Image: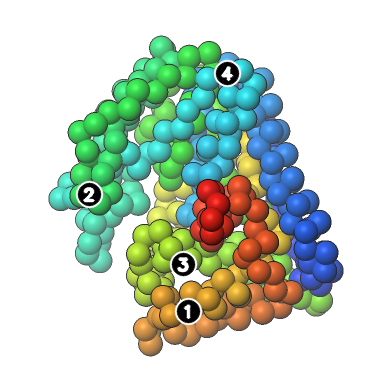
Amino acid sequence: MPVINIPKRLVSCDLIDFAAATPDEFISLCERQYAARIERAVDAILATPAKVVMLTGPSSVGKTTTANRLAQAITRRGKRSEVISLDDFFLGAGLYPQRAEGGDDYECPEALDLPYLRECLQSLCTTGQCEVPQFDFLLEHPSGHMRHVDGRGGAVIVEGLHALNPLLTGDLPARAVYRIYAGLREEYCGADGVRTLATRDIRLARRLVRDCLFRGHGADFTLDLWPHVCRSEDAYIRPYKKLADIQLDTSFSYEGCLWEGVLATKKAELAPGKHNQARFQTLCSAFTGFAPLPVTKVPADSMLREFVGPKKGKKN
């Protein structure tokens, strides 16, 4: 099957600012574009006999929300679909491989219960059903509870860092698996055409705020871990990008206008130490070239709510 590749695009900040002058229309357009990408991906999935959709991408590209949007779109078309997170197959505290510099390595595939994971994927391909473990992230151990997954007649979305790794799918029937690589495909430049903001910086802003809001981590934790996260992406994710049947763009052109304000409002919670202060300030200054938009403009059901949090008084 030929790979559907989406090259990165370099967009002028001036163009973004021009569009941001009419924020409601600009945001609505970006949200419709993302929704259209989801529908096109579902068209491609359902045109194949695939029973399992493996979805990967580097940190903070929106894998969780994107996987759920794909499953919802498949369900709307009258087919069964559920989402499985590879994180539920973590081995648990005391069983993880160790990083060379010390500490648990959550990023390598061996941090997962690979034998049982392969068994689940094989069951999905043959019967359309499987039993998925539930991981307790507070206790850092499998909970002992299982979830029944039924994708008969449809396709189950399996999302996680190692979803395209042949260690997981190498023994599965080729036509039973569809592979998606999700990633940001938009970067930004000044009037001189020189890149001022890369996709990795946008993902770092997303992760800093998400870790603060939902995981109780300050900027030091995220910034200290980020080099290891990036090395792991280069080692465990990008080498298998070429195996993807389609690349799914999770960029939102208007989000560059959000981050300076969002990071400023979280300044007290983030408050990096001296060793990270320069890195944090450099990241914040990368967004000063955008016309600011308030986070309240982000729709309640936007994928970006995975990172900036739900609107007050509304469910995400």
Q: Quadrant of the N terminus?
A: top right
How many other residues sit within 10 Å of disc 3, few (<14), some (14-19) or many (≥20)? Answer: many
Residue 244 visible = no
Q: Which residue is mark 2?
A: 140
Alpha carbons under labels 3 and 1: distance apart: 11 Å
Alpha carbons under labels 2 and 4: distance apart: 34 Å
Q: Secondary structure at mark 4?
A: loop
The amino acid type found where label 3 is placed reads: Leu
Horizontal relation, residue 45 to residue 112: left or right: right
Horizontal relation, residue 167 to residue 245: left or right: left
Closest to the camera, between mark 1 and mark 2, is: 1
Residue drawn 74% across and 45% down? 32
Report x, y in % for residue 145: 24, 31
Alpha carbons under labels 4 and 3: distance apart: 36 Å
Question: Where residue 267 is drawn, which disc sits there?
Answer: 1
The amino acid type found where label 1 is placed reads: Lys
Q: Which residue is mark 4?
A: 79
Closest to the camera, between mark 3 and mark 1, is: 1
Report x, y in % for residue 118: 33, 27
Alpha carbons under labels 2 and 3: distance apart: 22 Å
Whether residue 123 is situated above or below residue 228 in the rendered picture: above
**132 or 282, nearer to the observer:** 132
Report x, y in % for residue 179: 54, 33
Question: Where residue 208 is drawn, which disc sits there?
Answer: 3
Residue drawn 74% across and 62% down? 10
How many other residues sit within 10 Å of disc 1, few (<14), some (14-19) or many (≥20)? Answer: few
**251 or 169, nearer to the observer:** 251
Label 4–label 3 contact, CB within 8 A: no
